[in-house]
């Protein structure tokens, strides 16, 4: 009886699709020979809008300290990268990436006419839309619809740590959202095949079961990592992502979410903790990818819906801002500084700096340079890729 009830609960869960969303009817085509989805993309979402100025600190700029008398990172605490900027001290685990020229710092990433709503701004990032344009499908969904991944891949993409499919939302992709691999596999085992059914609704349920079972069998890597993963939710998510990457069939993209960056108050302690989790997670991910011999063909990118205002508020925090800083990491990343530092002496009327890198140029780098997919279709126009990858 317990098995029956558990299976019913699983089917209810699978039917509402918070665990797995797998398009049942994908029109498979052969990708052009120059397309290489074996080059893995790992997206790290910093949910809530990370404060870029305290992440990559312009410690040589007096205006930074004038705008943030309480929140500024002291000059002697900054992990210096250049004569002008350095990392938040919690990001010190990223120094080896910088020294090996495997860390690219993307300054001033944003877009024209920015939106400061969490919901709308992340929708813009996920769909690669213009500020006033509303699209239903994620930028990766459109990419895989136009140029499919190999049929033997376990999935197009896997979302870890969030039920929101983000850039993989919309019809036409094989996208899986899961909290952790073991839970996914346990629940998938409850979806035992019941054969065929005449009822169309039941046929759909059985089809969902079959898709979940197939994906679960591919995701079961059973890899015993030597890497020690950090404790906590983000460390567990990085471990899950590593297990997904270890699967034999492969995936094109994995997204991991680290939340809590909406620091309207008490920012110093909150961001210190979150950036420490981020750095430890990225270091562990690199070690795991080294074990799998995948570091050289993995590109890791951070992103968020927006940054924070340069001027601190009265609650020892920062409010919604515009352009921010993001990281690109990988064995083939051409490390260094890209974009421009925010011009803190030339802020807009609402107190925000102008953007230096259109976020769609970051996406164009993934499509044109990393995967060999023409970007102008999925991105709805031509955006110049960034020179952040070694040839």
Image (cartoon, helix red, strand yellow):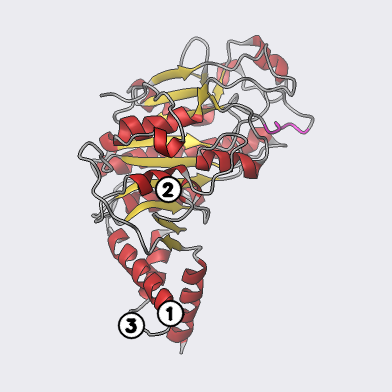
Magenta span contains residue 317:
yes
Q: CA distance from mark 1 to mark 2?
A: 27 Å
Residue 90 pos. (x, y %): 52, 31
- Quarter-of-image position of residue 68: top right
Q: CA distance from mark 3 to mark 2?
A: 30 Å
Residue 306 pos. (x, y %): 60, 34
Q: CA distance from mark 3 to mark 1?
A: 10 Å
Q: Secondary structure at mark 3?
A: loop
Q: Is residue 254 above or below residue 313?
A: below
Disc marking residue 200: 1
Determine crowd level at label 2: few under 14, some 14-19, many 20+ residues with C-alpha closer than 10 A. Answer: many
Q: Is residue 385 left or right of residue 51?
A: left
Residue 215 pos. (x, y %): 33, 63
Name the residue rendered at 65%, 16% in the picture: 64
Q: Answer with mark 3 or mark 2, whichever residue precedes in sequence.
A: 2
Q: Answer with mark 1 or mark 2, whichever residue precedes in sequence.
A: 2
Q: Are marks 1 and 2 in contact (CB under 8 Å)?
A: no
Name the residue rendered at 67%, 37% in the picture: 263
Residue 108 pos. (x, y %): 54, 23
**Residue situated furthest right in the rendering:** 314
* Mark 3 lies on residue: 196
Q: Is residue 331 above or below residue 137?
A: above
Q: Which residues are magenta?
A: 315-320
Q: Secondary structure at mark 1?
A: helix
Q: Is residue 203 above or below residue 58?
A: below
Name the residue rendered at 45%, 56% in the picture: 171
Q: Is residue 310 left or right of residue 382?
A: right
Disc marking residue 141: 2
């Amino acid at each position: 009886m317990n098995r029956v009830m558990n299976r019913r609960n699983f089917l209810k869960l699978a039917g509402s699709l918070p665990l797995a969303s797998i398009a049942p009817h994908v029109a498979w085509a052969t990708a052009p020979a120059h397309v290489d989805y074996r080059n893995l993309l790992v997206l790290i979402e910093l949910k809530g809008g990370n404060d870029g100025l305290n992440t990559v600190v312009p410690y040589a700029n007096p205006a930074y300290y004038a705008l943030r008398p309480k929140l500024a990172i002291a000059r002697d605490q900054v992990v210096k990268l250049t004569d002008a900027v350095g990392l938040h001290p919690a990001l010190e685990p990223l120094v080896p990436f910088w020294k090996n020229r495997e860390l690219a710092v993307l300054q001033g990433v944003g877009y024209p006419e920015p939106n400061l709503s969490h919901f709308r701004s992340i929708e813009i990032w996920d769909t690669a839309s213009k500020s006033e344009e509303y699209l239903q499908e994620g930028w990766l969904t459109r990419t895989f619809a136009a140029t499919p991944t190999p049929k033997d891949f376990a999935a197009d993409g896997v979302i870890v740590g969030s039920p929101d499919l983000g850039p993989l939302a919309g019809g036409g992709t094989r996208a899986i959202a899961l909290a952790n691999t073991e839970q996914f596999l346990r629940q998938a085992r409850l979806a035992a095949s019941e054969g065929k059914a005449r009822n169309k609704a039941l046929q759909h349920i059985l089809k969902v079961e079959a898709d979940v079972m197939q994906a679960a069998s591919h995701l079961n890597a059973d890899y015993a990592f030597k890497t020690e993963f950090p404790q906590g939710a983000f460390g567990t998510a990085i471990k899950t992502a590593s297990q997904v990457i270890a699967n034999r069939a492969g995936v094109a993209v994995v997204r991991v979410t680290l939340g809590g960056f909406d620091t309207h108050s008490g920012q110093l302690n909150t961001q210190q903790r979150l950036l420490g989790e981020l750095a430890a997670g990225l270091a562990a991910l690199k070690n795991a990818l080294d074990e799998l011999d995948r570091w050289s063909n993995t590109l890791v990118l951070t992103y968020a819906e927006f940054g924070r205002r340069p001027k601190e508020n009265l609650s020892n925090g920062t409010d919604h801002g515009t352009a921010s800083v993001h990281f690109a990491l990988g064995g083939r990343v051409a490390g260094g500084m890209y974009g421009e530092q925010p011009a803190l002496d030339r802020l807009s009327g609402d107190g925000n700096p102008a953007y230096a890198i259109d976020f769609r140029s970051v996406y164009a780098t993934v499509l044109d340079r990393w995967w060999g997919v023409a970007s102008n279709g999925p991105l709805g126009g031509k955006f110049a890729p960034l020179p952040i990858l070694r040839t």
